[in-house]
Image (cartoon, rainbow, N blue to C red):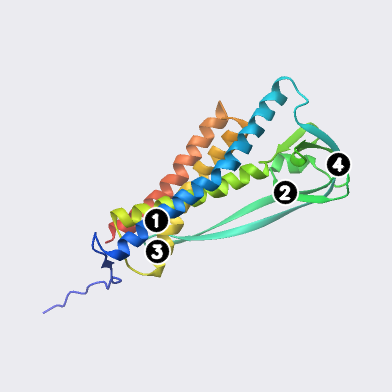
Amino acid sequence: MRLRRYRRLPLRVSLPKRSLGRWIVVAVGLGVLVAALAAAAEPYLRTREFREAVACERGAGDCIGNEPGSIVGRRTYTTTSTNTDANGTTTTTTTTHYEVTWRRANGSRQTRDVSSSFYSKAREGQPATLRLWRGEVVGVAVMGETQWFLPESGRTLGYSLSLAFFGLGVLLWGLLFGWWDGVFMLAFRTFAWMFMSIVPVSVTTDALAYGLDTGVGLVMEIVFGVFFTGIAGWMLLGSLDEW
């Protein structure tokens, strides 16, 4: 007689719907969500003020200041990320980053990642025009090419929205599922859920700071957003379907 072999699955412990542990998860998620949204209020208002300055600059001009500067450094570097899906398949992705360092009139230096097109025109020792908003460098122009950056308020807003998305995930997990099946699956589902937020949060903050892109740019944002969000959603749902 042949014996059938079964795959051994990690132990899954389901919390009762009205258990104290499950309500603690719900409370933590709700608390994080509310705190993150409250923290996003001021950066949101500041980012909207920056949006008004950008709109004024595009219309009347002279709404964003200029300061002479110079390019003092440039380099490229790569980062590697490894992702594992619910079936245990591992994929490795290598990304090339372009980095430029400039010097302000007061002698201070700042370094930021830029696009490949801007990097190709920014040469070391070359003069540059720094675009300022409330004393903060929000853009660098060289040889007719301008690289814009989110102001500090925009970056803070993005962090707050990401934290709010995390809190929403914890809240939904406590309300809809609430089981425990190991640290690995917890980390995997958290990664997949947060990966889903990257494109929407980035598009939202950019739109609040500079306005919603139109034409080909908007189409590309939608395509990339659907693609990457779809991959993360498939990974998340796949980890749930196994059980």
Label 4: element kind: strand
Label 3: element kind: helix
- Residue 69: mark in rendering: 4
Q: Is residue 159 above or below residue 82?
A: above
Q: CA distance from mark 3 to mark 1?
A: 11 Å
Given this view, does label 3 or label 1 mark the residue nearer the observer?
1
- Residue 186: mark in rendering: 3
Tag 2–tag 1 contact (CB < 8 Å): no
**Mark 1 or mark 2, which is nearer the start of the sequence?**
2
Label 1: element kind: helix
Residue that badge 1 annotates: 170
Amino acid carrying label 3: it is Leu
**Mark 3 or mark 4, which is nearer the start of the sequence?**
4
Label 2: element kind: strand
- Seen as rendered, the residue at the extreme bottom is 1
Given this view, does label 1 or label 4 mark the residue nearer the observer?
1
Which quarter shows the N terminus?
bottom left
Residue that badge 2 annotates: 112
Measured as percent of width and height from the top left, residue 48 is found at 61, 33
In the shown orientation, is residue 116 left or right of residue 191? right
